[in-house]
Image (cartoon, rainbow, N blue to C red):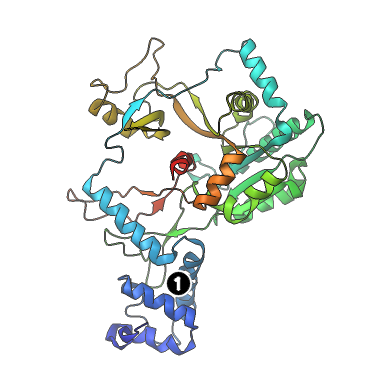
Amino acid sequence: MNFDFLERVELAGLKSHWVDWSEERRALVGRLMLADQGHLFSDWELRGASDGAKEALLLKLEGVEQHYPGGVCGYVENSRRLLEVARSGENPFEGCIPQQPNRVDVRALDGFYDRMEALGARQFAKLGVVMVAGGLGERLGFNGIKVDIPVESIGGTLYLKQYADAILAMEARMEVRRPMPFVIMVSADTDGATRASLEGNGYFGLRASQVHVLRQELVPAVADNAGRLALGDRYELLMKPHGHGDIHMLLHTSGLARRLADAGIEHLVFIQDTNGQVFNAVPAALGVAVDEGFDFMSLAVNRIPGEAVGGLATLVRGESALTLNVEYNQLDPLLRATVSPEGDVPNEEGFSIFPGNINVLVIGMGAYVRILEETRGIIAEFVNPKYADAERRVFKKPTRLETMMQDLPKLFTA
């Protein structure tokens, strides 16, 4: 690799450190320079000044290089590609015709519901629970991790305890009791506090060995359409969450998905961190998944047309069809441009025929492990920059690439 850039005047500070660095670090810096990221190292102070801050910056870059598929430069390349798509206003659903998704209605508490719930209960011993819990409670007015928010105000039951109690209740209904795996995805923001809550409360009655904590790493923020990584101050690389779609990659790279399948787990239910009623619906939902033989299933709720909730739709393009969540601000324009000039309209009950996505997924392990091994669990990314100008050239604030766990069906066609 050519390191002629070290002779540039503005990189004198970088050059003063060069002799101390490993070949791996030098190579990474060289690749970043080739990727037009020279601003990260421009006008550094000479060796001996702010060395700790410089080292922190480099360690962040090396962390991204290690955990992001394709490394830092792969992240920059993906950012440029997706930012160009966003800037041009390209429609991700171009050529798709939306149709009402296939659904099984268990709204009525009737005999069918009872049969599905009983069938699901018989599968408890073959079920694992996956919770994505990377967020803090700031937007909810809570100073701490969201799973430590009380579900109710009388007894002060925490969300984490609510979920543990539900798992213990399902274990108690197994014909032969066994610990139900509980997988928790945390972030740098929630890792320490989540572990402290679990350990400080005796895992809320669960066995420590049945709780699996997987940590999601942050990704760099991006400052502009050129994919320049954003700095807070001179030596601070801004980092942001990558979205809950990382759970699939973590289940694969940790080997946990394969181990659970080998241990006899046949389904995983994916939940979010503050859905206190979710386990009321899990038994019947699991029963439906077993009865229908679904590899992938989303729980949904009634949704009023125009409501700010993503809608589940089957998107048909040529001979292929894929059932996905379509964000509410994309669904109505898509309908108007294709099958419904009036947009998202109510049915005879007053609801949209595209039910609301609540990010509760039931996934069959056989297909899931196969998909993870074929794709490494890498979910399609998207970017949602907020522009400060009509030409979409300037961001109001740095953006980042994101993923969503409910986009897993896209991998079934990978």
Secondary structure under tag 1 reads: helix
Amino acid type at image mark 1: Leu
Furthest residue to the left?
391
Q: Where is residue 260 in the image (x, y as percent from the top left)?
A: 68, 46
Quarter of the figure with the N terminus: bottom left
Q: Where is residue 57 in the image (x, y as percent from the top left)?
A: 45, 72
The quarter of the picture where residue 291 lies is top right
> Which of 57 and 322 lies nearest the eye of the viewer?
322
> Which of 197 and 12 lies nearest the eye of the viewer?
12
Q: Position of residue 145 (x, y in %)?
A: 58, 47
Residue drawn at x 28%, y 30% as measured from the top left: 334
- Residue 116, compared with residue 42, is above or below; it is above
Count of all numbered marks drawn on residues in the image: 1
Task: For residue 364, say whether it is visible.
Answer: yes
Q: Answer few, some or many: residues within 10 Å of disc 1's Cα (few below 14, many 20 plus, some between 14 and 19).
A: many
Residue drawn at x 51%, y 50% as measured from the top left: 374
Q: Disc 1 designates what residue?
A: 57
Furthest residue to the right?
176
Q: Position of residue 332 (x, y in %)?
A: 30, 28
